[in-house]
Amino acid sequence: MNKKEYIIRQIAKTNKKNYENYVVTRIFHLINRLDIKFVTQQYVNRPEGHALTDMYFPQLKLHVEIDEPFHSKQKSLDLKRETDIIQATDHQITRIKITDNLESINNQIDNLVMDINTQIKNLEINKKWESWDLDKEFNPFYYQEKGYLEVEESPAFRKIVDACNCLGQNYKAVQTGWFKSKVYPNHNLWFPKFYKNKQWDNSISKDGITITEKCLDPTSYNSWYEDVMSNLVRRITFPRSIDNLGFKLYRFAGVFETDVNASSLENGVIHRLVETRIDIK
Amino acid sequence: MNKKEYIIRQIAKTNKKNYENYVVTRIFHLINRLDIKFVTQQYVNRPEGHALTDMYFPQLKLHVEIDEPFHSKQKSLDLKRETDIIQATDHQITRIKITDNLESINNQIDNLVMDINTQIKNLEINKKWESWDLDKEFNPFYYQEKGYLEVEESPAFRKIVDACNCLGQNYKAVQTGWFKSKVYPNHNLWFPKFYKNKQWDNSISKDGITITEKCLDPTSYNSWYEDVMSNLVRRITFPRSIDNLGFKLYRFAGVFETDVNASSLENGVIHRLVETRIDIK
């Protein structure tokens, strides 16, 4: 997918909602540059809970929320079990009030666009601006060069094998979602599904710091539990999700450690976030 | 309906077609002024036949056509019998090729927007620029002040009574679509439907210069025909149509005169366009 297809598809996500389409296209066309990435309808975790923002600029950690009557209500219906949700605790959120007249809506957007241009300029001055580059996204070599993965930057891969090789596994293809690390002692790479499926009922808390893991096969439950508790490893975790255009995604969620005291046969195995960053060796 | 609602609805017409939505919103947001009117998906009569243009600027008589593969084919399906069709013989048509890459599409639109700005500036310099004013549109007093109706300018009214009063009938309400003029000797005001209905099968040629009128009631056909041919009047004609947002419209089509030689009991009554302009007395 090239930028043209990407941008057209992102805008198309707003087609059913007329004001959203107006605001999103106006912001995009007035910023008028192809080196800034945007995502429409991005699910985020905020301290106050899940939310869906209408337009998200990852490079600025900036979200635009369009204040439509009954807006959030309608939208919350779209949340599917595989939905990609990013941690947005430290992100900015700007609101556009669309109940005002058109001149006021346009003024609000003009101000936002000025603000965005200033933020980009400041990043450029401080040499922290990174142009949106489709070849870098989801690219293991890009992250290897960068030298680390950090939850706050929402790094992600399209394939399990890419995440594995980014962290030094050197695979040609993979069949499972669980690997002993060749590089990090006593660490495993883990690609869980955080929704109930045939074999597992795993979930992550909304704040992204607690994972509950449960085997769903009653005949192997006890042996699985004993095995996990007697072979404690840190888990470099990449949950599987589906992004807003319908593509598979493995987004780095951090390094987790099993909480032996909180775990039990009844509650399942509990893992806690211990590192939000991992250096690539 | 205010400008905000109007603009949102016009853009919403493009929602199903992603490239059309991209191009139309980009043109609108980059022109960035609320005194220029636009219509999306306007049916036009051209010497080469019916066409649907993607974005139409009535003040500039300028149409934008988005060259999508299979575009016109899909769109021709939307034509309904009541569709408002304007005469666009002398209008400009600009094409935006969307098979190119995004930079090229944006360049084409930038050039078009520059061209539009120049055209507006030239009209302003020559004092021929008329700001888009919702209160003037469809307003009989506006046209009375202007002093004439001219087919090329596509004047229209929302109600039969407005068109009647614009031309001096001074009615409070009307029940029919056919009135003897109080102002123009030997002229009638006519508000025909140019599609088959219960009583009539009237139609206008694509070039807008020939009307065929046929009564559909066989028991009164002969007496109707004799009556028309023995009481020849000029017809100030406002066909009924439905605009692209679904609102009723009576658009001035010119003054027509019965062509006695071409008419026959078999073919119906034939009327020919004799004046495209009428001065308002």
Image: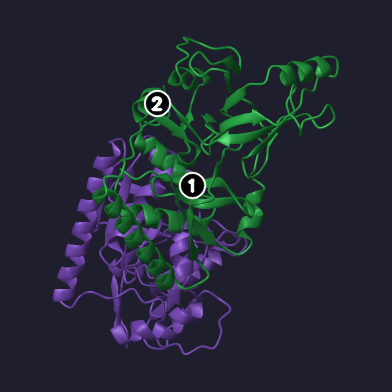
Chain colours: A green, B purple
Residue A162 relative to residue A50: left or right: left
- Residue B206 visible from this viewpoint: no
From the top left corner, tell me how far across and down residue B155 is, in percent.
36, 72
Q: Earlier in the sequence, mark 2 or mark 1?
A: 1
**Residue in the picture at 67% in, 47% down:** A77
Whether residue B87 is situated above or below residue B179 in the rendered picture: above
Whether residue A165 is situated above or below residue B226 in the rendered picture: above
Q: Quadrant of the C terminus of chain B?
A: bottom left
Residue flagged by tag 2: what amino acid is it? Asn
Residue flagged by tag 1: what amino acid is it? Thr
Residue A138 relative to residue A255: left or right: left
Chain assignment, label 2 = A
Would you name the residue on which mark 2 appears? A139
Q: Please tell me in which quadrant of the rendered image residue B45 appears.
A: bottom left
Q: Please tell me in which quadrant of the rendered image residue B262 appears.
A: bottom left
**Residue in the picture at 48% in, 47% down:** A40
From the top left corner, tell me how far across and down residue A275 is, in percent.
54, 34
Q: Are marks 2 and 1 in contact (CB under 8 Å)?
A: no
Label 2 environment density (alpha carbons within 10 Å; few <14, some 14–19, many ≥20): some
Do the residues indicated by labels 2 and 1 lie within the same chain of the protein? yes
Kindly give the residue lying farthest to the top in the view shown.
Answer: A172
Q: Total number of numbered labels?
A: 2
**Residue in the picture at 42% in, 76% down:** B138
From the top left corner, tell me how far across and down residue B7 is, in percent.
43, 64
Whether residue B202 is situated above or below residue A198 in the rendered picture: below
**Which structural element holds mark 2?**
loop
Front residue of B92 and A6: A6
Would you name the residue on which mark 1 appears? A40
